[in-house]
Image (cartoon, rainbow, N blue to C red):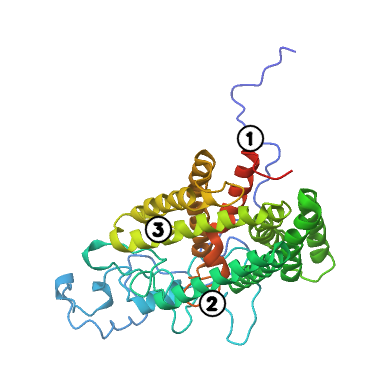
Amino acid sequence: MNQQRSSDQPFEEIRILGLEPADDEVEPGRSVFGGEPPTEDLPHWTEPPTAPVAAPPTDFTSEQPRWADDVPEHHESQQTVGAIDEPTAAAFFDDTSSGLGSGESFDPPLLPPDDPQPVEAGRSPVATHVEPEGGRRRSDRGGSDGGGRDMPSAIITGLGLGALALVAFKVGASATLALSTAVLVLAAVEFYGSVRRVGYQPATLLGIVAVGSLNLGAYWRFEAAVPLVLGLTVLFCLLWYLTGVDRDAPMVNISVTLFGVLYVGMLGSFVGLMLTDENGIGLLLAAVLATVGYDVGGLLVGRLAGRTQLAAVSPNKTMEGLVGGMVACFAVCVLLVGRITPFGQGPGDLMSVAVLGIVAAVAAPLGDLCESMIKRDLGIKDMGSVLPGHGGLLDRFDALLFVLPATYYTARMLDLFGA
């Protein structure tokens, strides 16, 4: 094993396993991929060209270089990158592929649009607010120079509503129940009509029936009827969309339907609950008087001294109007409600009416502002137009919807219900 190769015997070649020598050699002018016959030899790079040279472009008038300062201003090279006019930019960047033709229908949106709806002819825009002279802000309960209201019509309408309510109170609980149920049903019609205008598709008929049933059921079967009606409303709402009466966005539209039932129907059903008591007419009259006191006081003080904006949801309401309305509400409770049964005869129980005055003075502006928030979200000015000078029934009784349960539970707490 000690064999050694002779030093004078050279290696013929070194071969690496896996690498084979090329079958042929690359020739000049021949493709390395093979298959083509060799072409004629290319000239050496030092030899002058034999093919004709193309003439220079006609744009160049001289052989000298042209600097940027010599280029005309209108030349495209002198334009700023991205400097295009607005119409051109709109043509490039506006996405109009999703737009609808003039004759096409559209599916209701899941959420209402951010922009307010187009304003009908003869009505004030929702978001338009003109600052009165002197920097004062007027209450939107005001007249034509305040929140766009017609004050003479508003006063006449208010007196007519008051007279109608007093007649119903005088006749008795049945007439009061019928009047209140009709008002609540019409208010529900206004609410569902308003949400439909912005694209929602609630179960309108079902919601209206539920609102009326809540008030009647509360009067005939007391407090136990309220959860029963609400439970049935939820069940029938689900069936409404399950059976295909309406198919669009069931989760959103069921929520809108139930909100209308709770907002108008459940809060309004406290009228029926009050009327079940022998002193129910007095309780309802106390709630109405407290609400009227707040509305009138806020209107007068806001128009005369309103300067500081109260809330963004209602730009026309002022802090001065709020304070004036609350003070007027408390004063009405002490001076008038204290003379009404069950709050007492003659001067009445000062403690009871004081508590009611405080509670109503807090509940009334909350109801007012909540309805303003809903209208602002929907992009509308009024819920309806059935009441000249006031708008709709919900616009007139928004504060009362909150004062009703406040009065009912205050009377419960003070044990003012009859045996």
Q: Earlier in the sequence, mark 3 or mark 2?
A: 3
Instruction: Estimate how packed mark 2 is, as few (under 14), some (14 to 19) or many (20 or more) residues with alpha carbons within 10 Å.
Output: few
- Local SS, label 1: loop
Three-letter residue code for mark 1: Ile
Cβ atoms under marks 3 and 2 closer than 8 Å = no
Q: Is residue 54 left or right of residue 372?
A: left
Q: Nearer the viewer, residue 409 or 332?
A: 332
Looking at the rendered image, the disc whose residue lies closer to the viewer, 1 or 3, is 3
Residue under label 3: 297
Residue under label 1: 14
* Quadrant housing the C terminus: top right
- x and y percent of residue 378 in the render? 54, 66
Calculate the distance from the C-alpha at mark 3 to the C-alpha at mark 2.
24 Å
- x and y percent of residue 383 in the render? 55, 70
- x and y percent of residue 198 in the render? 58, 71
Calculate the distance from the C-alpha at mark 1 to the C-alpha at mark 3.
113 Å
* Quadrant housing the N terminus: top right
Q: Which mark is residue 417?
A: none
